[in-house]
Amino acid sequence: MPACVVLAAGASVRSGPVPKALLAVPGGGTVLRRIVGTAISASFSPVIVVLGAHAPALQEELRDLPGARSCVHAGWAQGRTGSFKRGLAEAGAGLGGTLLWPVDHPFVLPSTLDTLLRAAASRLSKTRTPDPAHWALPTFEGRRGHPVLLSDTAREEVLGYRDDEPLFRYLRSHPGHVLEVPVEDPGVLENIDTPEALASALGRIQRLGPPGTSLPPARES
């Protein structure tokens, strides 16, 4: 299975006194616990959480989650891509890909992760071009969301980017290697930068979410 890199290094200045990764979610636990638990339950390994501004508090939150480990990126303020690169380097190569998951998208369904993996594998099996889907991303109602699945080929290119260089450079440079995967999951679009955004996201997901699904439970020790 591919690795998973969770980006949780930012200062979360808009989330109030509590970092967004530690905001509480329904069912118990926090945003960070929800994401890490979902990735572990989907068998991504290793699960790497990149920390920065709030490293001590987030390390404590991860303490009782076997299957996940953290790394600290001292240069987190230089740009999000630098933090992703730190996580990619920590995870290592040759794992069949890497899932990049920003911590401000906690309400992604486990089924979406399975759909991304199946879609990338299906495209590979239908073409003679080696590793054709270098960047697979979910879409909901035609809009691109998170998390995204990178091939080992894309990983190597991203590692060469400047720390302050946006990752969408890859999408613009390699449109033929980008795979959009439609999913019935509004959580791929929900960005919970503030407590108010978290509350709004919960309302929209409950209203729009597909029948027979629920938000992924927090993983408890």
Image: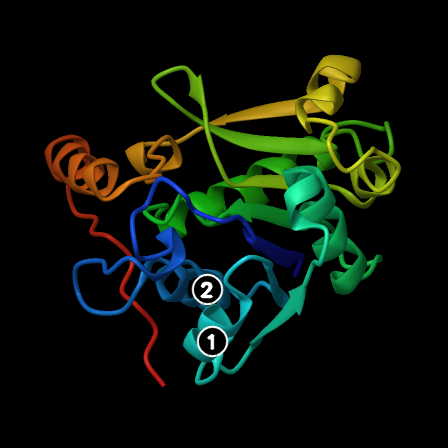
> In this orientation, does residue 147 appear?
yes
Residue 124 coordinates in the image, percent (x, y):
73, 35
Mark number displayed over residue 36: 2
Q: Quadrant of the C terminus?
A: bottom left
Q: Looking at the picture, which amino acid does disc 1 mark?
A: Leu
- Which image quadrant is residue 130 in? top right
Mark 2 burial class by Cα count in 10 Å: few <14, some 14-19, many 20+? many
Q: Looking at the picture, which amino acid does disc 2 mark?
A: Val
Q: Which secondary structure lies at badge 1?
A: helix
Q: Residue at image x 19%, y 38%?
A: 196
Side of 125 where 219 appears, left or right:
left
Of circles 2 and 1, the one toward us is: 1
Q: Residue at image x 27%, y 69%?
A: 29
The residue tagged 1 is 62
> In this orientation, does residue 46 appear?
no
Nearer to the camera, 195 or 91: 195
Residue 219 coordinates in the image, percent (x, y):
34, 73
Side of 192 where 80 appears, left or right:
right
In the displayed structure, 148 sits above or below 22; it is above
In the displayed structure, 68 sits above or below 221; it is above
Residue 156 coordinates in the image, percent (x, y):
87, 42
Going from the N terminus, do you reach mark 2 or mark 1 first? Answer: 2
